[in-house]
Amino acid sequence: MSASMRRLARRVVAVGVTATLAAAGSTFLAAGAAQAAGVRASVVNAAKAYLGTPYRLAYGWTCGRAAVDCECLNRHAIWDGTYAATGRGLQLNYWLQGQINQGRRTTAPRPGDLIFWDTDPNDGIRYGGDLDHTGVYVGNNKAIDANAYYGYVKYDSITLGGTEPDPIFVDVLTPNGY
């Protein structure tokens, strides 16, 4: 069988499987740019749902939904957004470095990516493992973060008003199949 015949046979099988799943009432999610954009929009909408929520420092897996810190906001926005868009939620680690390690750094951030800042100039470790703050990038050089200084979840610039000129961005969605 030629290579083109094998490709055609695989395509016919894929179409048949899709039709079988649809006939059985299963949800079949087509991978691609449209699905990825939908997941990202859903993550941004989930983060927006927390705007105005009070800030409360939480440790480990203890964060709730009535008050959140920055890591909790990320965890809830990613879980809620991916679950709403695909029916399967992505569970993020509870600490900053763990969240970074679940994705890959990017210099071309897209809405739904995470943003990280080193806001403590006295710790002496610029992005060397001691990150201090995080949020969800929503596009147009804006982020949503649970801000301890203001005491609630709010929109921020990606430079935190100019105080943090070099944030890092991490894509946790693409590497985890969203």
Image: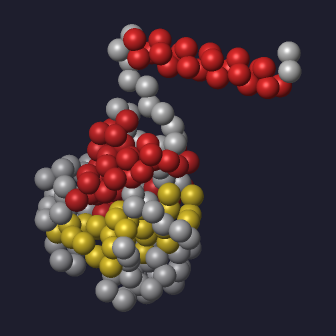
- State the scheme by which the image is colored: secondary structure
- Rendered position, 72 above or below 85: below
Q: Is residue 131 left or right of residue 59?
A: right
In percent of width and height, residue 22 lies at 41, 17
Can see residue 32?
A: yes
Residue extending furthest toward the right: 2
x then y, percent, for residue 34: 44, 46
Towards the viewer: 56 or 134:
134
Which residue is at a point 56% across and 20% down the rendered structure image? 15
Splitting the image into 4 quarters, where does residue 85 fall?
A: top left
Camera-side residue: 13 or 172? 13
In this rendering, the answer to whether 106 lies above or below 5 is below
Number of marks present in the image shown: 0
Residue 58 visible in this rendered orientation of the protein: no
Name the residue at 30% across, 63% down.
Answer: 70
In depth, the one of 23 and 26 nearer the eye is: 23
Residue 104 x %, y % = 57, 58
| Residue 27 percent coordinates (x, y) | 38, 23
Quadrant position of the N terminus in the picture = top right
* Residue at image point 44% right, 43% down: 35
- Occupied quadrant, residue 152: bottom left
Residue for point 53% across, 54% down: 103
